[in-house]
């Protein structure tokens, strides 16, 4: 269930008669999490709130095991929409997305306008936080006579135009109609996925920092490192295949597939379960030369320069074993 309003959230908790709740968010929203905890406590006196202090990157990371351990009534997952591939689905999880209020300034819009003039058809997608601003941008551009496209993602729970690090279906739906993508967001994380997986000019409309970022340079930098990693893995003999125990990142079948395929290539393969795949955790496996990770596909992109050894995701692995062409995955 998604609740977007604090009042309604508190009403829901009261109605459920919840006595112990668990609230979680990505690291960047911790202050907002504390603010929310204060608000709930002010309104509901007899409630116990447990704040999740673990790393959390998405709706793919609902900690099902804490439900029974802590005898929880409700989990409130702040900052994301439900994740379609969650295999652990505790019943009472409320998704409470957060939206930024910062408006598109006149100065930023003028820059967008100048850029838009160079193209005929414009595609708009957003990161959840900037959903409202993306609709505002669509209206403004259409008002100024541009052809603008925005679509709902494949998954129902997601908002119009919303993309995730691992789901750019809202962009795929319009890619053949447009000449350029405007990704309404902050930072390059969401836009990088679009730039890598769809070969169209891609720009971040960075609302927070009031700037536009062209993704082309970054796209080329990441593509060459990905290609290098795939080739490097080919030469490695000892390879670890990582399974994630996270609710939406658990892909045992993919891990088993990778394991079997690597065996056919006469590699020495190890199945490893790892919750947070970081350079530090990987560094303890001194004698493993490369890893295939079946958790979050973006780890093998965004952390690629932090990892000292190749860490391929499944689509990169499929390129490695010849089941896909590099240009198919990264056109
Ligand atoms: S990109 Fe990774 S962290 Fe984000 S929702 Fe997808 S699997 Fe989860």
Image (cartoon, grey):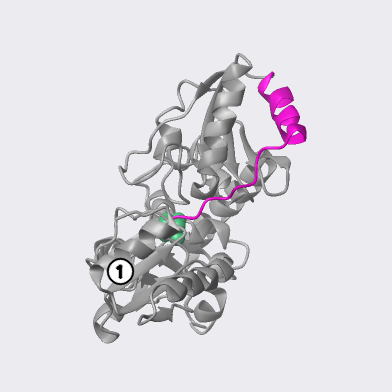
| Residue beneath the point at 53% across and 61% down | 232
Q: Is residue 99 visible?
A: yes
Does residue 116 lie above or below 257 as drawn?
A: above
Asked where in the image residue 105 lies, by quadrant, the reply is top right
Q: Residue 73: x and y, percent?
A: 26, 75
In this view, the residue farthest toward the right is: 107
The total number of labels drawn is 1
Does residue 45 lie above or below 106 as drawn?
A: below
Q: Residue 138: x and y, percent?
A: 55, 27
The region drawn magenta spans 97-117
Asked where in the image residue 10 lies, by quadrant, the reply is bottom left
Is 284 magenta? The answer is no
Please state the quadrant of the image where ligand 1 appears: bottom left
- Residue nearer the viewer, 26 or 8: 8
Give the labeled residue for mark 1.
14
- Residue nearer the viewer, 31 or 323: 31
- Residue nearer the viewer, 288 or 176: 176
Is 112 magenta? The answer is yes
Q: Is residue 251 visible?
A: no
Asked where in the image residue 244 lies, by quadrant, the reply is bottom left
């Amino acid at each position: 269930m998604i609740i977007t309003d604090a009042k309604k959230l508190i009403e829901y908790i009261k109605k459920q008669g919840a006595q112990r709740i668990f609230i979680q968010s990505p690291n960047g929203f911790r202050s907002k999490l504390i603010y929310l905890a204060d608000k709930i406590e002010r309104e509901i006196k007899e409630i116990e709130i447990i704040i999740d202090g673990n790393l959390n990157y998405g709706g793919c990371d609902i900690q099902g095991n804490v439900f029974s351990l802590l005898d929880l009534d409700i989990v409130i997952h702040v900052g994301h929409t439900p994740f379609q591939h969650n295999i652990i689905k505790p019943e009472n999880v409320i998704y409470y997305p957060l939206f930024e209020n910062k408006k598109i300034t006149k100065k930023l819009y003028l820059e967008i306008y100048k850029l838009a003039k160079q193209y005929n058809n414009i595609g708009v997608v957003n990161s959840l936080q900037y959903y409202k601003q993306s609709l505002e941008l669509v209206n403004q551009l259409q008002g100024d006579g541009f052809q603008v496209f925005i679509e709902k993602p494949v998954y129902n729970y997601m908002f119009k135009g919303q993309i995730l690090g691992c789901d750019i279906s809202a962009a795929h739906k319009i890619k053949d109609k447009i000449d350029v993508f405007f990704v309404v967001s902050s930072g390059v994380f969401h836009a990088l996925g679009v730039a890598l997986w769809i070969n169209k000019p891609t720009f971040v409309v960075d609302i927070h920092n009031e700037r536009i970022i062209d993704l082309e340079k970054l796209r080329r930098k990441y593509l060459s490192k990905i290609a290098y990693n795939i080739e490097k893995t080919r030469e490695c003999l000892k390879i670890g295949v990582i399974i994630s125990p996270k609710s939406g990142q658990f892909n045992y079948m993919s891990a088993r597939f990778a394991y079997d395929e690597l065996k056919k290539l006469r590699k020495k393969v190890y199945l490893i379960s790892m919750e947070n795949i970081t350079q530090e955790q990987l560094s303890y496996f001194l004698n493993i030369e490369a890893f295939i990770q079946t958790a979050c596909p973006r780890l093998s992109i965004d952390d690629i320069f932090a990892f000292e050894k190749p860490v391929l995701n499944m689509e990169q692995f499929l390129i490695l074993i010849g089941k896909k062409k590099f240009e198919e995955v990264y056109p």
